[in-house]
Amino acid sequence: MGIMAEKTVLLYGTGNAAKFAWMRTCLQDLDDIELIGLQDLDCAWEEPEESGNLPLDNARKKALCYYRVCHRPVFSIDSGLFIEGLPDGEQPGVHVRRVGGRNLTDKEMRAHYKQIAARMGGKCVAQYQNAVCLVFSEDEIYESQAKDLSWEPFYLTTQERKQREEGFPLDAISEDIRTGRHWYDMEQESGPESIGTRYCTFFREALQAHARKKGTEQLYDEDAYRTSFEAKVVRCEETVGGYGVILDRTAFYPEGGGQPCDRGSLQIIQGKGTVSVLDVQEKDGEVWHLCDGRIEAGAGVRGRIDWERRLTHMREHSGEHILSGIICKTYGYSNIGFHMGRDFVTVDFSGMLTQEQVDAAERAANEKVLENVEILTAYPGAEELKELDYRSKKELDGRVRIVTVPGADCCACCGTHVRRTGEVGPIKVIASEHYKGGIRLHVLIGKKALADYAEKSGNCGKISALLSVKPEDVAEGVAKLQEAMNALRMEYGALKMRLLEQKVEAVPAGQEKAVLFEKGLSSEDMRRLADSLHKRAVFAAVFCGEDGKGYQYVMISRERDMEAFGKTFNRRLQGRGGGRNPMIRGFVPADRPAIEACLASPV
């Protein structure tokens, strides 16, 4: 199956039917070019002025003349004939047919050049120097008068063949220098084939340069619902992470404007192989596809878009337009940042919103979704754009694409969107935070909002069952449970402190050393317990933890240098901690017997 991309239609600016047929033969292998002639267009042509001194001058004059009439890509070719040994003033140059102020017929041309050959001994060495000029616009012109476009030198002779080819009168008196054979006999061996290849090279390179200049045709701009397409590889370059592939046209959306890129695959049409498209970026009008394999330039490919990913982005981008437009119109705050993340969309606004304002904007956005209005895209003219009140984060030049959600938003945007608001689905703001003097909203749109609702609804049902209340009463049920928990927590705290006090009271007053090992104490509980214990002993220590996991500690003494003691204690048990006299805190990864042995030994 062939590539379906449109061909580049080139007009050959010549009235010479033989030259047109010859050029069509030369370019027949360039399947991306469709050649048409002046006879194919309904235009009033005037004979271009050929007043240049070089072939390129006249080729350019003719191509520009035809372009200004038809305003489409056109090329012209001009030749100059130069004869060795002929004085400069007699050289035919670009005026091959014009002699003595008038254009010669084919018969007169042969007679004229036979006379020159006779003057120079029966034959003379001649060469055609060619030039080509291709015009896409007044500002985009490709041209060449390179030596490789010239014909090989040949003989003009006095010997004339009866064979004739209209449009090429001098071929009847031309011979090949190398073989001495007549030009007509050499036609199938050299001539058109060799120079035709050079013309093919010129046009191929010019078209590639034109493709780079005009950038990649962006099919997603025309139809965001397009999931497959066919294109031609312009070039492929090895880069970080894979191969950068540029196509002449693409439906893959490149990352930009807060919207992630599309992903998918490129299948080689003629041949085998499929590569994955891992990333898509735009630079200078060209769309780069980061692929996991190489594709040769010129290959035809069939691209396929990951539709679920694309549709998610279309819904989220359209939903963001609705919400941002409503907030801008209602509260006057601009959208200063937008990003589609994996889990949710973030939208940044230039001012603060209360929760009541956020809720109101969310309700209005969902009402617009339910209205199912058409989302419009357009490229207004410069004058119309001046009168249009639209949102934009930056100054824009060139063509500006305007996306309009009637009654909600009008914004400059290059992203992909759904056709109608009803396709967006629910819009739900799940969180907000202060951001750069304004507010950042975390938003779920479409399937993500539905999934969030399903998850929260399921959790609500489970809580309802656990509390033995109706789903609509779970908030009140949790509040009552929290009150009961607070009461129990206070009761537990009081009982715990009473138990600790009893443990302290069980220690005889006036002890040299008192050490307690406990579990489940907070750092404040440990400090208070150690303080109380120190009132009954010169040295008091409280450890909280368990063997195998280590112990937190608080130790206190007003008669010892606890800072020095702590350093020695930690060194012996590979612990850490510190403090100032009289109290130190820390942790040791030791078991209780090792701790007790360390405390019993002299420090």
Image (spheres, grey):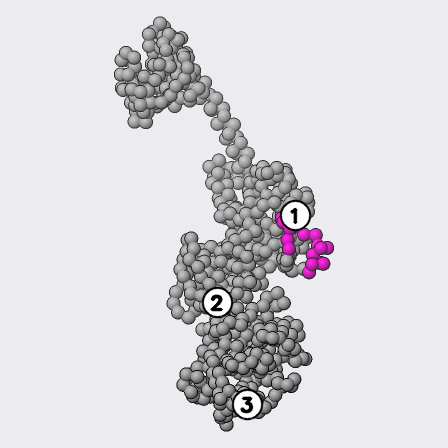
Identify the residue at image location x=30%, y=14%.
599
Q: Residues within 10 Å of mark 2 (few under 14, many from 20)?
A: many
On the question of residue 541 being in view, the answer is no
Q: Dot 3, how many residues are within 10 Å of its Cα: few (below 14), some (14-19), or many (20+)?
A: some
| Residue type for callout 3 | Gln
Q: Earlier in the sequence, mark 1 or mark 2?
A: 2
| Distance (Cα) linking label 1 and label 3 | 87 Å
The residue carrying mark 1 is 326
Q: Position of residue 123 (x, y in %)?
A: 48, 87
Q: Is residue 396 magenta?
A: yes
**Image marks 1 and 3: residues in contact by CB distance under 8 Å:** no
Q: Could you tell me residue 422's position as x and y percent?
A: 60, 55
587 shown above or below 339: above
Look at label 2 and name its amino acid.
Lys
Q: Identify the image quadrant of the N terminus.
A: bottom left
Residue nearest the observer in this picture, 91 or 38 = 91
Residue 579 image-quadrant placement: top left
**Which quadrant, please, contains the C terminus?**
top left
Q: Which residues are magenta?
A: 381-397
Q: Main secondary structure of the magenta part?
A: loop
Is 57 in front, or is 484? 57
Name the element at disc 3. Answer: helix
Whether residue 406 is situated above or below residue 545 in the rendered picture: below
Sequence-earlier tag: 3 or 2: 3
Amino acid type shown at disc 1: Ile
Frontmost of labels 3 and 2 is 3
Q: Which mark is residue 232?
A: 2
Q: Secondary structure at mark 1?
A: helix
Tell which tag, 1 or 2, sits nearer the viewer.
Answer: 2
